Image (cartoon, grey):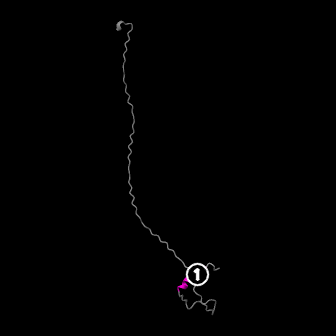
Amino acid sequence: MFRNRCCDRPMFAESNNYMAQQDINVEYPAAMPMMGGAGCGCEMPPVQECPQERVCHREFVHNVPHIVPINTRIINHHVYRHTYTPVFTSCEENVVSNVYDNCPNNF
């Protein structure tokens, strides 16, 4: 039932030996409550409790400003649409041929 008490742990026994080596005097109160009914008068030594640890988590907020230069580049695209309108012209050429039938001396 009491096997998991901190005084059953090896570390507790070492800490008690350390306290005994340091000659620490623990004074008990003169009037301890009586145990076991009327007239017993037995005093109990103080109970050594397991040490406790309290952990406090703290958060710190650090503001770090960042400067980011941003350049805007504008590219203008000029598109030339070429359309072709054909313009037709014409020319005329006349060719003359002379035919001489039975004509002496090319007359």
Q: Please tell me which residue lies in front, 56 or 19.
A: 19
The percent coordinates of residue 24 (x first, y second) are: 53, 86
Name the dominant secondary structure of the magenta segment. helix
Q: Does residue 61 sit above or below 74 in this rendering?
A: below
Residue occupying the point 56% across, 83% down:
17
The percent coordinates of residue 36 (x first, y second) are: 64, 89
Quarter of the image that includes the C terminus: top left
Q: How many marks?
A: 1
Residue occupying the point 59% across, 79% down:
10
Quarter of the image that includes the N terminus: bottom right
Q: Which residue is mark 1?
A: 13
Direction from residue 84 to residue 27 in the image, left or right:
right
Q: Does residue 11 sit above or below 37 in this rendering?
A: above
Direction from residue 17 to residue 60 in the image, left or right:
left
Q: Please tell me which residue lies in front, 9 or 72.
A: 9
Q: Residues within 10 Å of mark 1 (few under 14, many from 20)?
A: few
The percent coordinates of residue 31 (x first, y second) are: 56, 91
Q: Amino acid at mark 1?
A: Ala
Direction from residue 93 to residue 29 in the image, left or right:
right
Q: Does residue 61 sit above or below 1 in this rendering?
A: above
Q: Does residue 79 sit above or below 71 in this rendering?
A: above
Q: Which residues are magenta?
A: 8-22
The percent coordinates of residue 97 (x first, y second) are: 37, 14
Q: To which quarter of the image does residue 104 belong?
A: top left
Going by the picture, which residue comes out furthest to the right? 1
Residue 104 part of the magenta segment: no
Q: Which secondary structure lies at badge 1? A: helix
Residue occupying the point 54% across, 84% down:
19
Q: To which quarter of the image does residue 21 belong?
A: bottom right
